[in-house]
Image (cartoon, grey):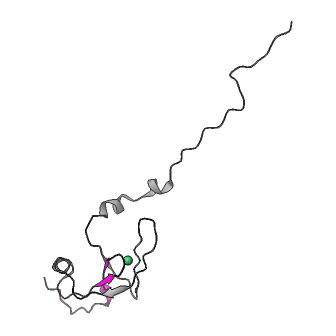
Amino acid sequence: MAEETTPQGASPAAPPPAPPATPPAAAAAPAAAVTEAAPAEQKVKVRKPRQRSCDEKDAKGKLCAGHLKRWYDYPKDVAAKIGKDAEIYRCEFCKTLYKPDPKQMPHSFTLRY
Ligand SMILES: [Zn+2]
């Protein structure tokens, strides 16, 4: 008896299932960074000792590295945040504000609000 053995639909060369293409950055993004990003709100950071350039990173993770310049004629809304006649520095590129290192501030200095 000659039996025709033609396997139909049982192909061994089935392609493996493709792995899900999920970028790891999307899952690892901290929730705090998302909620902190407020539009039109000026960011105020504290300067590290001897820090002279901006260490802010943009959305692509690129370092800003802008020069921190002493900012004297800041507007009133900034003065309300940092205090009048406060020592403040501003990045020339991303406009992030930098307060001086609190450890370098004299203890006799009193904040006036
Ligand atoms: Zn910057």
Q: Residue furthest front?
A: 93
Q: What is the quadrant of residue 35 in the picture? A: bottom left
Quadrant where the N terminus is found in the figure? top right
Residue at image location 43% in from the left, 79% down from the top: 65
- Residue range in magenta is 87-113
Q: Position of residue 89 (x, y in %)?
A: 30, 85
Q: Residue furthest left?
A: 113
Residue at image location 38% in from the left, 83% down from the top: 48
Q: Position of residue 54 (x, y in %)?
A: 39, 80
In this rendering, the answer to whether 99 lies above or below 16 is below
Q: Is residue 108 magenta?
A: yes
The answer to which of 10 and 113 lies nearer the viewer is 10
Residue at image location 79% in from the left, 16% down from the top: 5
66 horizontally vs 75: left or right: right
The answer to which of 46 and 20 lies nearer the viewer is 20
Q: Is residue 6 magenta?
A: no
